[in-house]
Image (cartoon, rainbow, N blue to C red):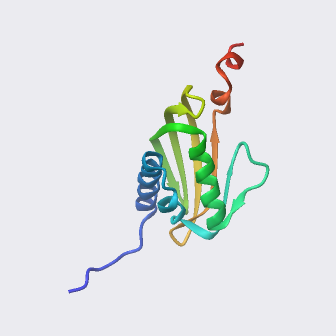
Amino acid sequence: MMAKTTPATVSEIASRFMRTLQNIEATGDVNPLVALFSEDAELMNLAMQEPLTGKDGAHRFWEKYLSVFEQIHSEFNHVVESNGTIVLEWISKGTLSTSEEIIYRGVSVLELNHEQVHRFRTYYDSAAFLPNGAKQG
C-alpha cells in the first residue's frame, strides 16, 4: 500500500529550514540548505547592495555566511507564518574567524513559492561584528 503524501505546510517548511540551517552550521555543508531554495531565489542581507540569485547565489550566500565564523549555532525563539511568508526571530552564538566570541540577534524573512524559498532576507545586529575596541562608545 502506498503512503499518502500531502504538501508540506508552512509549519513543516519552517521546521525543515531551521533544522537544516542548524545542520549546515554544524557540518559546513551548505548543499542541504541550498536545496530548499527555488531556481529563481533571491537572497539578501544587510551587508549586500544587490541580492544573490538562483541556486548558485544561494550556495554563495550560505558559504559566505559560514566563512565569517569558526563556529556558529543559531537558536530560533519565535516563528510567525502567514500567507506563504515565514518570519524567524533568532539568536546566534559562536566564534568569529578572528577567534572573537559573538552573540547576535536578528530576524529572517522567507517568502515561499511552491514549498521552496523564493526570497530570503535577513536583518541582524551588525554592530556585533565590529572589533571589540570599536564597540565601546
- Report the side of 106 relative to 46 (left or right): left
Q: Nearer the viewer, residue 77 or 17?
A: 17
Q: Position of residue 45 (x, y in %)?
A: 68, 47
Q: Position of residue 100 (x, y in %)?
A: 56, 25
Q: Nearer the viewer, residue 93 or 100?
A: 100
- Residue placed farthest to the right in the image? 49
To which quarter of the image does residue 112 belong? bottom right
73 versus 115 height, above or below: above
Name the image quarter holding the C terminus: top right
- Residue placed farthest to the bottom in the image? 1
Point 79% across, 49% down: residue: 49
Point 74% across, 47% down: residue: 48
Q: Nearer the viewer, residue 98 or 109?
A: 98
Q: Nearer the viewer, residue 78 or 35?
A: 35
Q: Position of residue 51 (x, y in %)?
A: 73, 56
Point 64% across, 19% down: residue: 132
Q: Is residue 78 visible?
A: yes
Q: Is residue 119 visible?
A: no
To which quarter of the image does residue 76 belong? top left
Point 49% across, 33% down: residue: 94
- Residue placed farthest to the top in the image? 137
To which quarter of the image does residue 1 belong? bottom left
- Residue placed farthest to the left in the image? 1
Q: Position of residue 56 (x, y in %)?
A: 64, 65
